[in-house]
Image (tube, rainbow, N blue to C red):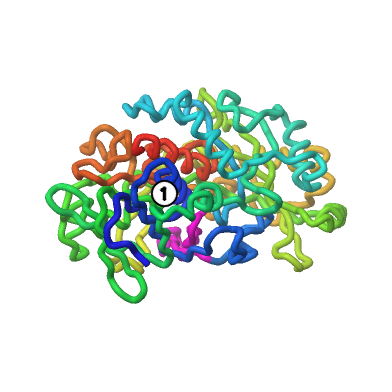
Amino acid sequence: MLSKTVDTLVIGGGSGGAALAGLVAERSNETVLLAEAGPDYGPLAMGRWPAEMLDARRLPASHGWGYHSGDLMGGRRLDFERARVIGGCSAHNGCSAVWGTRADYDGWAQLGLPGWSLAEVRPLLAAADRRLRVRRFRPEQVPPFQQASYDAMRAFGLPATDINDPEADIGVDFCPMNSHLGIRWNAAFGYLDPVRHRETLTIAGHALADRLLIEAGRVRGAVFRHEGGCVEVEAGRTVLAAGAYGSPAILLRSGIGDPDALRRLGIAPAHPLAGVGQNLQDHPAVAVRFAGTPALEQRSAAFEARGWYPDELVIGKASSGLYRDGFDLHLFPTGGRVADGVEEWSWAFFVASVRPRARGRLGLASADPEAMPAIDHRHLGDADQTDLAALVEGVAQVRAIAATPPLAALIGRETDDIGSGKAVADWVRRNVQHYWHPAGSCAMGPRPEQGAVVDGRGKLHGLEDCILADASIMPVVTRANTNIPTVMIAERIARWMV
């Protein structure tokens, strides 16, 4: 049940919301309500979690929001997978636990956001790793395809590195993962299970946030659709952590955004804040797919018979040569069975531009909270086409790696008609997708007139008692998988709250 009055209301039980709610409950005597639109399966020990949500080897297909690109991808509909369940995307991701680079966080601080430099957030990234039981793998736990890919990237010229060394910007590593005993250790396990017994904490599943309640210059709570009706919750402070798609959508439904755009949807403007839904980012990516060989399948099947075969385990940090500082590409092999028990294997090398120039936007198609927002990432839409050039260079590097021993003897032929020369750029345009890392749609910044939605402590500009704590507040997306950085954001803001 939803509590009607609480000290702290947290909207969204994903990576950021679960972590923040758990930390506030742990470190204070405040009453905390965590409201999640999807189900809450309770603590891990109760045994109610679906097996596919726990299996760290595969990406589960259930519990999605159904976000997609609509008609904005040139006749191609792209699904934007986000998890509608307690734990959020930490409950269905690939478990890659990556921090990013010094330039990411020092860059945030240089935008006028004190408290976000690498020196200040590094202990919080480490705290997130501990809570999510991030681990490294022994050599005998590395599948043949991942090992051959790692060895080929080393032979190609990428040095061995610690991928979570923020000072090491080029290299390849076996990725640390939030996987414990084969279980995807999500933010609910790490932050909520230790405090679920506390009477001050309430966790409500199937509670869909409709809009915020705004009165006299402050946010006083929110309206939810829950158990067949509408429920108002009054709160001393409200924390919005519904993700890079959900958080701006809730703000817009609440009348917070561009007044003209809101009026066109029949929403009465309550607070002008033009940056809501703007600055949307993700890492554009393409997948170069290969046929594999009988030898690779045989070795992989023998390895899989031991009971453990993760699809993802290796990430290379590389440079396209388009920037003077640091890296701007992720090169990561992924391979394994299409589904458990199916005699079909899939092998690919993804290339992601992790320093994208393009910026997209999120708007509403309807004021109905069940309606999907209009999401336009504008991948490859930067004016000088730097993002396109980076991916084209990344494809060239993947092809060179695939031709390097020991991978060359195992990976087989390319299965797509990528071509050469200018044809590669055309192929990239036709096949660009996201890297599952949306961010930036409610960006931090000191000045709302410059597009900022929240200040450097996550507080909503212009309204009291409302804080955002998820990937939406990243002013620039990290050069990393965003799960650990999002949990770090919750760690950072929770320390400022209590």
Q: Is residue 261 left or right of residue 119?
A: left
Q: Where is residue 346 shown, x and y percent of the image? A: 72, 58
Identified at 29% across, 54% down, the residue is 6
Q: In x, y percent, where is residue 148? A: 79, 42
Picture quarter with the N terminus: bottom left
Q: Amino acid at mark 1?
A: Ala
Q: Is residue 432 visible?
A: no
Q: Quadrant of residue 294?
A: bottom right
- Where's residue 211, x and y in %? 26, 60
Please give the name of the residue rendered at 79% of the width and 57% of the height, measured from the top-left corner.
Answer: 307
Residue 362 or 421: which is nearer the viewer?
A: 362
As drawn, 447 above or below 184: above
Q: Residue furthest left?
A: 216
- Quadrant housing the C terminus: top left
| Magenta span contains residue 90 | no
- Which quadrant of the structure image shows residue 163? top right
Q: Position of residue 240 (x, y in %)?
A: 34, 50
Observer-nearest residue: 364 or 243?
Answer: 243
> Eyeballing the image, is 408 above or below 105?
below
Residue found at x 83% / y 40%: 406
- Confirm whether the magenta stretch covers residue 64: yes
Q: Residues within 10 Å of mark 1 (few under 14, many from 20)?
A: many
Q: 344 or 202: which is nearer to us? A: 202
Kindly give the residue lying farthest to the bottom in the view shown. Answer: 228
For label 1, the SS is helix
- Residue 270 in view in this figure: yes
Residue that badge 1 annotates: 21
Majority secondary structure of the magenta segment? loop
What span is in magenta? 63-89
